[in-house]
Amino acid sequence: MIGTIRKHSKWLWWFIAGATIISFVIFMGAPSRNNHGGGGDQDLGTIYGHKVTLQDYIRARHDVVLFYWFRNGDWPKMAEDEMENVVYEQLLLNLKAEKLGIQVSDESAGQEANLLMRSISKEQINFDLFKTRLLPSAGMTEGDFVQFVRDRIAVQELIQTLGVGGELITPQQAEEIFQREHQETSAEMVYFSASNYLSQVPVTPEAVGQFYTNYMAAYRLPDRVQVSYVAFDLTIYFAAAEQKLGKTNLDNAVDANFRQRGVEGVPGAKDAAEAKAKIRDNLLRQQAVVQARTAANAFASEVFARIPARPENLAAVAKDKNLVVHQTEPFGNQYGPQEFMAPESFVKAAFALTPDEPFAGPVAGTESFYVIALDKQLPSEIPPFAGMRDRVAHDYQMLNATARAQSAGTNFIGQLNAQLASGKSFSAACSAAGVHPQSLSPFSLNTGEITELMSRPTVSDQVKRTAFNLAPGQPSNFVETDDGGFVLYLKKRTPVDAATMKAQLPEFIAQLRNMRAGEFFNLWLYYEKNRELKDTPLFKRLTAAQNKS
């Protein structure tokens, strides 16, 4: 099979961008320390009467990691509990496929492997690079990739087998669904926005103070942490990278790479000069990653070596080395620091710090490596009103303006129905009520976003769902939104053109059957997990946490 991959591989060497390389060192391919860090004799549970081994678990974990990489172009950065949940699901599928006797031929595996490699060929990643660089960076081998390919095919066949009931749909049923989802709707809408009622809301100190008292819990701040950090940014190592490589060697490497690939082999390059510049930048970036990581490791080692371990050691070592120490504002674990786009691993490391273990790093980001130290741990609290006055006043005004807008919309419905019952048109009824209707561009359930509502995507979805339940000539009830609400009037529906339906129906039926099969399979998987994973550490831990809460 691997010979087949090499035979069909026509992709040229390309150095992966530094941002991607950094991400490789974030992910650790080792199994979760919660359940099997202690070795092969750890109890990992039983599935389908099979006692799960450490080898089974690692195989499933590698399957999950590789699936994520081929889909997203990066190693997963999910929380360990989330990863464990997905791994056990993959374990169940692997064992179910084996239980059903699903066999994967070498020919099928070879074809699937080549399809996977072609899917990443646009990134100029060939199999040799994948095998010698990418797989080892996540603790995997060529054999793990081969097993992943076989497991992937087996699970695909399992899904098709178990989801076959969902594929039972007649052409007539498909035509009805196609017509319902694609027929265009013409409608008018009256929108009652809170912004039109802000001036009607009196804002007094007493009212705002009472509002804060009533909604105090909504202003509670989460647990937060404040850290100091030293950033080893890639850009400052480009000069060192160029010196390390040597100008002559670098120029030769660029020329050799360009001869192999040409202009068309360098994404985004318009001519030879631009292609060579991009190749040069990627070569330097790769070397800069090595330089930055080395410097960050050396700095971190010196910080960690100082005894006793105190947060100020980071600043002391940084001063000795003329490095700049930055400090974040306190931040929660949901959004991270406000000062820069920190990777999830930075936030996770920051919240794992303690007074006894106040350091972490190097933590890899897309453009930097970070060594961090704990400054403060701030528990959840409700801030004093004095510092929140302006925000509370704005919230008070918006909430009351929204209530006024929704009241106006509800009152309009009564007037509208009376006017329509007397024979007046929707436009005339709106004029009599002193509101202005807005004509919407034709749309269907299949429309992405309605043109006039691009700034309100959630409202766009509400309008489509509302229109689906109306008959031509019928107004909707008042539909509330986050900042007011709307009334929709359905003017007409336009059936799908027969020629259009005939041309698109075959592909639509295939998509519909795949969707139905997926729904059947997901339903099966839901019940199967609840039954077969109950004897695993994950299930027991989740059950205990649920009972405790």
Image (spheres, grey):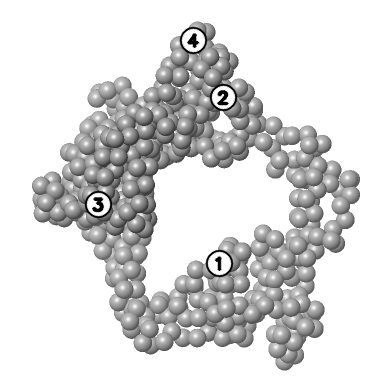
Residue 426, above or below 66:
below
| Quarter where residue 392 is shown | top right
Alpha carbon separation for disc pair 2 and 1: 49 Å
Residue 370, above or below 283:
above
Alpha carbon separation for disc pair 3 and 2: 41 Å
Label 4 sits on residue: 306
Residue extending furthest toward the front: 248
Q: Residue at x 79, y 80 (%)?
A: 433
Label 1 sits on residue: 461
Give the structural element (helix, strand or loop) at label 4.
Answer: loop
Frontmost of labels 3 and 4 is 3
At label 3, the amino acid type is Arg
- Of 284 and 300, the residue lying toward us: 284
At label 1, the amino acid type is Asp
Label 3 sits on residue: 261
**Tally of numbered discs:** 4
- Of 293 and 102, the residue lying toward us: 293
At label 2, the amino acid type is Val
Q: Position of residue 545 (x, y in %)?
A: 48, 33
